[in-house]
Amino acid sequence: MALLELRGLNKHFGGLHVTNSVDLVLEAGEIHCLIGPNGAGKSTLFRLILGEHHPGSGDILFAGENITALKPFARIHRGLSVKFQVPGVFKGLSVRQNLEIALQRTHRSVELAREIDRLLTFLNLEAEQMQTAGNLSHGQKQWLEIGMAISLKPQLLLLDEPTAGMSPEETHQTGEMVQRLNADGMTVLAIEHDMAFVRQVAQRVTVLHLGQVFAQGSIDEIVADERVAAIYLGQAHA
Ligand SMILES: Nc1ncnc2c1ncn2[C@@H]1O[C@H](COP(=O)(O)OP(=O)(O)OP(=O)(O)O)[C@@H](O)[C@H]1O
């Protein structure tokens, strides 16, 4: 079953055609990676899915419902969540307080504390829970932000370059987190440049180029595709 369906999505910024008739189907329960050269339109596609940008034409369907005209909060309410590249954690607050803010609207007292503890364990941040978020390492900040993005248990999690700036070890741990979320039923769409991460987690890969879907398939099919190598993988990303 399709959880997310993009039909003929177009987005212009002035004369710049950033998203050009994009059709994309995300199956419920899959981990799907979106790759492509800088400026291909990947982040713009995320903003269209979230409702921060509105398409000039085309439709976005989520769980069978046309959400194209819905505001971002209404989309989040339906089970969509996104972690953008720039960490949006509250730097002056502790790790625990950050998670509390994310969870306090849906959980109370004992249940709230239990849910925070569960997330801290999941994120490998138990020992850092009283630390100020601004003092976390880059990788830990990204994990905290993933924690905030999954606090409402979304059906679909969008991750914009979740492993940017991470060490190979941190990247691998992030991949394991994504796989655990997926095993629990979450569908994931991740923009990534790190091909080790893509190889670790992706069940399907879509290559975006000049605002269009250029190729789609398994990671092995994508890596073997000479057309993809010519526009992207040849640029030392593989
Ligand atoms: N708000 C905006 N106004 C004008 N142009 C924009 C805007 N947002 C993005 N663009 C342009 O749209 C194009 C696609 O940008 P986008 O950030 O979606 O690409 P990307 O594939 O995510 O790139 P990267 O891998 O570098 O993050 C770029 O040429 C960018 O300059």
Image (cartoon, rainbow, N blue to C red):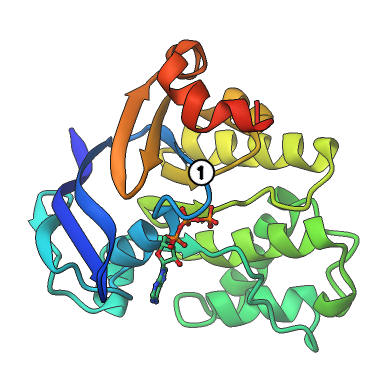
Whether residue 164 is visible here, answered yes or no, is yes
Q: Which residue is found at the position 52% from the left and 17% from the top?
A: 223
For the C terminus, the quadrant is: top right
Give how far across and how far down residue 123 sits, in percent. 72, 53
Name the residue that disc number 1 marks.
Answer: 37
Residue beneath the point at 65% across and 37% down: 194
65 displayed left or right of 33:
left
List x then y, in percent, for residue 27. 27, 34
Vertically, is 94 above or below 172? Answer: below
Q: Nearer the viewer, residue 41 or 219?
A: 41
- Please rate how many residues cluster around mark 1, counting C-alpha atoms within 10 Å: few if below 14, some from 14 to 19, many from 20: some
Q: Residue furthest front?
A: 15
Does the image show residue 115?
A: no
Q: Is mark 1 within 8 Å of ligand 1?
A: yes
Residue 178 is left or right of residue 36, and the answer is right
The amino acid pointed to by label 1 is Pro
x and y, in percent, of residue 113 in the image: 67, 71
Looking at the figure, which quarter contains the N terminus?
A: top left
Tag count = 1
Q: Which residue does the image show at 58% across and 40% down from the upper left?
A: 178
Who's the residue at 23% across and 79% down the image? 71
Q: Position of residue 107 (x, y in %)?
A: 50, 75
Q: Secondary structure at mark 1?
A: loop
Residue 106 vertical placement versus 25 (above, below): below
Up-down relation of residue 123 to residue 94 (above or below): above
* Picture quadrant of ligand 1: bottom left
Q: 17 or 75, which lies in front?
A: 17
Apparent side of residue 171 relative to residue 34 in the rendered image (left or right): right
* 217 relative position to 12: left or right: right
Task: Identify the residue at the far bottom of this view.
Answer: 92
